[in-house]
Image (cartoon, rainbow, N blue to C red):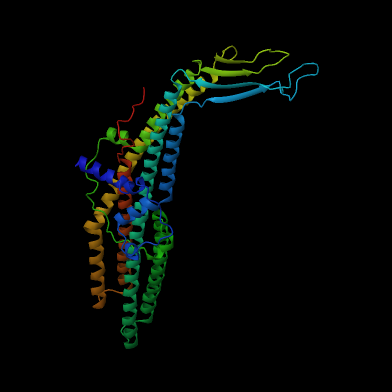
Amino acid sequence: MVSGLRTFALAFLLGGLSAVAAGAEPAHGVAPLNSDLEQLTLRQAEIFFAARNREVLLGQRLVEGAEADRIAAGQRPNPNVYFNASQLGNTYPPGYDANGFTRRADMTVGVNQLFERGNKRELRVGAADSNVLASRGDYADIQRQQKVVLFGAYYDLVAAQERLRIASETAESFRKTMDAVERRLKAGDISASDVARIRVDALRAQNDARTAQADREKARTALAYVIGVERDAARINASDNWPDLDAAAGTPEIDKALAGRADVQAAQARVAGAEKSRDLARSLRTRDVTAQLQFDRTPWNPVTNSTSANTVGFGVSVPLFLNYYYEGEIRRAEVELQGARDKYERVRALALGEIAKSRADLDAARERAQRFRGSLLQAAQKAADAAEFAYSRGAIGVMDLLDARRQLYATRLEASSTQADYAKSLAAWQAAIAVVEIEPKTTEKMTQ
């Protein structure tokens, strides 16, 4: 059961990841099929979400940027080419016989190359690799959080549709009742005051139906933004029912759930990256070497050089740490490493609290939903039916009838709200324990 729950949670988080990873772009200019939206299932909503959700797409750009930084970190320093010219002029000074030759400049051409020592390049690459992993973890965590938003928006629409149906049925029931009591009033079988009481409740039911219709439109708009189909919001109708009450059976191992969470893995990768950055700062004390190769061309000069000469030279330069030994950079890197470790512990603590809270909310919502499904709705319906029967036989007054109808109406609305709370609590719980892989190989463990 635990294995099945873990598989379900993973599918919940990564249901639309393949479309994004394949480079699917949001087709904002292409309207989706109306039939897809008019009978929108949760699975279809996830497909739209994976391809169009703006927050998810922004998270993908973060990963792409980190991968670009990884390319830059792995490059070696470029060589430098230089050229110098001296003794410029067209003629020799007066008094010198140059046999008619024009004066030529002395020229120097050279190239120098910095050679890094102390494994600086490897440490930069290691830090960049850890940053890529952290970005992938952030991306997966954005997906996790947005999936909760998606499920919440979808079930808010389901609840809004159900409230509209309940309010419309109630208003229609009162309309039929008003037709009947108007005839009874004309026949003298009912008092005008009773008719007025029923008419008040009938008008309230119409107002409730109109409010429920506005709430449905708001829920459509919220869901349309999450799945990126704002222009077609008016066509959206959620077709799925409420989730099964046994969907949250079983409890995974908390330690495995914590270790597999995207935000925890991202924080862990940042610790590894901070360690590489600290080592990179320490490696600044290892002197880099700059090598230089130079070619000098010195033409014939009757003043300074009676014969022309071409020479090749080689040089090496290293820095002298006489005034500064990179204490600031090293100290800064050590502080950032400790900060990354502190953040890792904080993220783990918050994740553990989220798991515990979401489970408590889920258990409470599940118990409430079970009561409504098991007995409350049936009891309210039986009470309302009995009141209708008794009123039709003259056994109770109109106020007792209206009280029974109000109780049934309120119970049905509360049941719908409870079902929505359970569905959203289930989504939050599944997201809290979702296990993802942010890299194909084993994640580098944090150094204790």
Return the x and y of residue 334 as percentages of the image width and height.
Answer: 47, 22
Q: Is residue 95 above or below residue 430?
A: above
Q: Is residue 236 above or below residue 257?
A: below
Residue drawn 33% across the image and 46% down it? 17
Q: Which image quarter: residue 119? A: top left
Left or right? Give the position of 259 relative to 58: left
The outermost residue toward the front is: 99
Tell me the quarter of the image containing the N terminus: top left
Would you say residue 326 is visible in this rendering?
Answer: no
Task: Name the foreground residue: 219 vs 45.
Answer: 45
Residue drawn 24% across the image and 57% down it? 373
The outermost residue toward the right is: 94
Tell me the quarter of the image containing the C terminus: top left
The outermost residue toward the left is: 1
Q: Which image quarter: residue 214? A: bottom left
Return the x and y of residue 423 as percentages of the image width and height.
Answer: 30, 52
The outermost residue toward the bottom is: 187
Q: How many marks?
A: 0
Left or right? Give the position of 210 relative to 411: right
Left or right? Give the position of 123 relative to 442: right
Q: Is residue 25 above or below residue 36?
A: above
Would you say residue 183 is visible in this rendering?
Answer: yes
Return the x and y of residue 445 as percentages of the image width and height.
Answer: 33, 27
Task: Name the foreground residue: 201 vs 54.
Answer: 54
Residue drawn 56% across the image and 14% down it? 313
Q: Which image quarter: residue 170? A: bottom left
Left or right? Give the position of 220 relative to 244: right
Q: Is residue 121 above or below residue 23?
A: above
Return the x and y of residue 219 as percentages of the image width and height.
Answer: 40, 59
